[in-house]
Image (tube, rainbow, N blue to C red):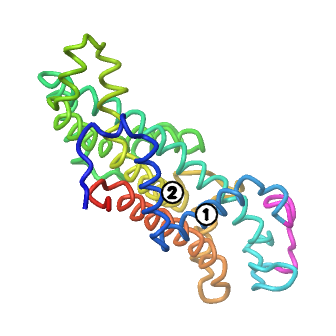
Amino acid sequence: MKKQGKGQFSGSTESWIHRAWRRFLRHRLAVGAAVVIGLLYLVAVFAPWLAPYDPIDDIFVTRRLDGPSLQHPFGVDEVGRDLLSRVIWGSRISLTVGFVAASISLVLGVTFGALAGYFGGVIDTVIMRIVDLLMAIPPILLIIAVVAALGPSFTNVIIVIGATGWTQYARVTRGEFVSLREEEFVESARALGSKTTRIVFYHILPNCLAPIIVLATLNVATAVLIETSLSFLGFGVQPPVASWGNILTPGRQYLRHAPHIATIPGIAISITVLAFNLAGDGLRDALDPKMDV
């Protein structure tokens, strides 16, 4: 078994990607999860064409709380709206929040982690003490407090989740930079007169991508869960706009007589989070250089 050493990423990008892709394809659960994630995003993108009814304006008062049927495969909610349409449109909110918030966290965390890990000293101390402080506060409590201050809205939820979820990226990136900044290929780049930005972005950062990519995949699932939790509690996307979380909120009142209102969006959330976690596990194995054969 051949072990890929530090700093080899930039010199053999094509072969590294090919080996990682080959290992990922051998992970059947991860491949299946990736397919599910792709289908979920296709549903979100094509929601206007896939939803049989308008999720807000089409109301069937006489069929309130009706269970699944041919006309309404997921049943009807407490107002009389088609649940399938609301779940489809809700996927847009939840998946968009998950992806955009995770992207914001990734950019912030990698930036601060790279600064702390490469320069060290006072910069490292200040950034990591901020990270320690934020990680000492339960994330959901911090997010609820900030959203309550700013007001519940789609945009505020994205910003708050993204701005409070960067600490893990910072710790991972900082650790990778600390271990790589004294490697021979970095010292050689310095000796050749390479600028700091080139050393960071061309030589060090590519060798940190594996754990960052895995963390980003898992972070999307976390962001989806946080968004649904906020919407469920009334701090997220507000009705009548459909979100998986705010569909669940009234559903808890009808668990005995109309369990489909709560269980169907709950199943959608579970499938989404499970798919991202399985895909993350597959990526972790695929991007591990120790797995080279």
Res 244 label: 1
Q: Residues within 10 Å of mark 1 (few under 14, many from 20)?
A: many
Give the mark, 1 or 2, whose residue is nearer the N terminus.
Answer: 2
Is 133 within the magenta?
no
State left or right for residue 109 relative to residue 277: left
Res 224 label: 2
As drawn, 164 above or below 249: above
Q: Nearer the viewer, residue 189 or 138?
A: 189
Element type at marker 2? helix
Tell me which residue sits at (61%, 63%) in the image: 244
Q: Which residues are magenta?
A: 52-63
Give the amino acid at mark 2: Val
Say if mark 1 contacts mark 2, CB within 8 Å: no
Quarter of the figure with residue 32: bottom right
Give the amino acid at mark 1: Trp
Q: For the view shown, which residue lies furthest in the left direction?
A: 121
